[in-house]
Image: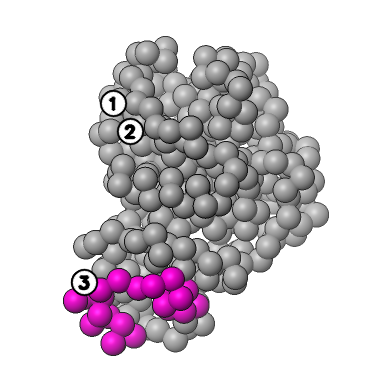
């Protein structure tokens, strides 16, 4: 590791095989926490390359517990994190909204590393017990339209660096990797990124992987569609800049999307959204992200039609019902 760090500090880059090997060594416990922290810190000072990203991804997928849910043609809706905005769980609430609209979702999530509440935090707050049991995951996606995969259970490498990531409390290349290593490898992905440079890196990666994808970024720095500013959406058809008002939504303020100071605060907001009791800004953020996710799965559904589908899901109670069924299957009895 020492020689590798010297190379990286001297502004060298790893090739794909080197990146793959170092991550496998990390998972095998060959490096201590200080070495891991030093390695991670390199990527706070420079951007990850496509070859490095491919190598890291291949290493994690080689080591993960595979899950085959391909027959459901699900979507994953996720943000990289690392935008330092501490929003409530917008993408997780969007997953259940999309599920309520009749689409299949396979959410790959983790505890918050740079925010108060990650997807796994809000799931645990509701008593969800994480599992790798394929029968339970199938039952969940069949009956509630959503399966939840807690990342550390499916990939030991993510578990070995969890403590370091939490202690650093800054975005790392693991934020970049997380959305790419869903063990299901869904062919539909909606991904939020914290800057446009990262968005284009994902664009190149998704071009290689194929399938349907949308990479979203709000120009004021959110790794999701926040409606606090104009936002860019990159798909296989190209990229487009949207203005909140032009897609039918009022512009929100940053403080409107806060996840609060505790996991309990975030869980209350999450519940309010699914109960259709959230503030207008909170509800709109979930609706617009859900709509672009629906459009990702089926590009023939216009954004206007997708917004209507998402609205019906929340307002009719369908999203709430899918969450209730999800808890019935997955929560501690």
* Image: 278 above or below 235: above
Q: CA distance from mark 1 to mark 3?
A: 35 Å
Mark 2 vs mark 3: in front: 3
Residue 131 in view, yes or no: yes
- Quarter occupied by the N terminus: bottom left
Specify whether 116 is left or right of 278.
left
Q: Which mark is residue 156?
A: none
* Image: 247 above or below 161: above
- Residue nearer the viewer, 38 or 86: 38
**Residue position for label 3:** 11
Q: CA distance from mark 2 to mark 3?
A: 30 Å
Local SS, label 1: loop
Q: Position of residue 318 (x, y in %)?
A: 67, 23
Estimate how packed mark 1 is, as few (under 14), some (14 to 19) or many (20 or more) residues with alpha carbons within 10 Å.
many
Instruction: Check if residue 166 falls in the magenta segment.
Output: no
**Residue position for label 1:** 229
Which quarter of the figure has residue 3?
A: bottom left
Local SS, label 2: strand
**Residue position for label 2:** 218
Local SS, label 3: loop
Circle 2/circle 1 CB separation < 8 Å = yes
**Which residue lies at the image location 36% right of the left edge and 31% below the top edge?**
232
Q: Earlier in the sequence, mark 1 or mark 3?
A: 3
Q: How is the image coloured?
A: one colour
Which portion, as a residue range, is magenta? 1-24
Q: CA distance from mark 2 to mark 1?
A: 6 Å
Q: How many marks?
A: 3
């Amino acid at each position: 590791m020492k020689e590798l760090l010297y190379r990286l500090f001297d502004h060298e880059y790893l090739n794909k095989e080197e990146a793959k090997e170092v991550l496998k060594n990390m998972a095998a416990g060959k490096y201590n926490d200080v070495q891991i922290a030093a390695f991670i810190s390199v990527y706070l000072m420079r951007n990850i390359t496509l070859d490095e990203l491919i190598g890291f991804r291949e290493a994690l997928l080689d080591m993960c517990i595979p899950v085959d849910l391909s027959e459901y043609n699900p979507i994953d809706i996720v943000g990289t994190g690392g935008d330092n905005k501490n929003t409530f769980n917008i993408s997780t609430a969007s997953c259940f909204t999309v599920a309520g609209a009749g689409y299949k979702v396979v959410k790959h999530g983790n505890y918050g590393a740079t925010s108060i509440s990650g997807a796994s935090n809000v799931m645990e707050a509701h008593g969800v017990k994480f599992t790798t049991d394929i029968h339970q995951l199938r039952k969940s996606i069949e009956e509630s339209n959503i399966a939840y995969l807690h990342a550390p259970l499916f990939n030991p490498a993510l578990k070995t660096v969890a403590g370091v990531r939490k202690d650093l409390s800054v975005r790392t290349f693991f934020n970049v990797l997380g959305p790419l290593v869903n063990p299901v490898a869904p062919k539909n992905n909606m991904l939020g990124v914290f800057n446009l440079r990262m968005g284009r890196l994902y664009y190149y990666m998704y071009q290689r992987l194929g399938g349907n994808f949308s990479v979203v970024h709000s120009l004021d720095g959110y790794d999701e569609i926040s409606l606090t500013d104009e936002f860019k959406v990159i798909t296989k058809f190209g990229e487009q800049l949207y203005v909140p008002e032009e897609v039918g939504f009022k512009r929100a303020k940053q403080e409107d999307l806060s996840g609060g100071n505790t996991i309990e605060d975030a869980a209350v907001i999450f519940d309010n959204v699914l109960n259709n009791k959230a503030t207008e800004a909170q509800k709109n953020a979930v609706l617009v992200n859900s709509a672009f996710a629906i459009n990702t799965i089926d590009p023939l559904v216009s954004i206007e039609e997708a917004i209507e589908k998402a609205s019906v899901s929340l307002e009719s109670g369908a999203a709430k019902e899918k969450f209730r069924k999800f808890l019935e299957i997955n929560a501690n009895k």
